[in-house]
Amino acid sequence: MVRPPSTSPSPSGEVMALPVQRSDADLVNGLKAGDAWARVMLFDRFGVLVERLVRRILGHERHTDIADVVHDAFVAVFSSVHTLKSPEALVSWIQSVATHTACKAIRRRRARAWLRFVAPEDLPDGAARPPSEETVEAHDRTYRILERFSAPDRAIFALRFIDGMPLADVASACGISLATAKRRLARAERRFVVSASCDPVLAPWVRKGDRWTP
């Protein structure tokens, strides 16, 4: 994780000490002013959150580099921060940007899918210890089902059931009302359960009520 530097050169070339902590309001103002320290601090503060949401939505998407999507999400944040009216909404707004960026990555991949003939194998990483073969297989089959979902349905399912995000936050991240989020989530859940129940690996997870989270 990138850490913000403790000092930064001023326009005159003098070195100025940066405060250890900045409020979200200070951070948003710094971003809108184009300050380099604000960009570094934003990544330092929200990098893990954005990467986690992107991974939850994409899984280990074939032909998709998670780091590239995370980078695109931060580029979108930097380029559209002027639209953020309330610093208090910074976290939910970043969640929304990350969600929409991941959905765009899914759509781009599908648009280019006809060009691909061989798919490399991807396995879950980042765990403290190697996952069991059963967990890896359940993970892969879960995202194989989700690959057939539309990007919005996949995002709402992954954020709620895989990431465990509260439904109100899911609605905010997806840019829809709570009522719409409930309807879409119920539809996505029904579709997933039907498919997972017919899968010999995932069916036991569904029966155990583990919410399909390998």
Image: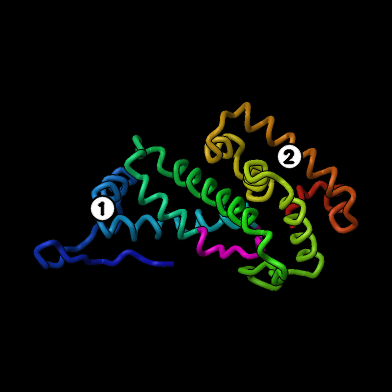
The residue under label 1 is 34
Query: In x, y percent, where is residue 195?
Result: 84, 47
Residue 43's tag is: none
Q: Is residue 67 magenta?
A: yes
Q: Are there few (<14), some (14-19), or many (20+) residues within 10 Å of tag 1?
A: few
* Residue placed most toward the observer, 21 or 121: 121
Q: Write the residue at 63% across / 33% down.
A: 181
The residue under label 2 is 188
The answer to which quarter of the image holds residue 38 is bottom left
Residue range (magenta): 59-69
The answer to which quarter of the image holds residue 58 is bottom right
Query: In x, y percent, where is residue 30?
Result: 26, 50
Q: Which amino acid is tagged 2?
A: Ala
Vertical comparison of 33 with 48: above or below: above
* Residue placed most toward the observer, 61 or 22: 61
Q: Write the residue at 69% across / 71% down.
A: 120
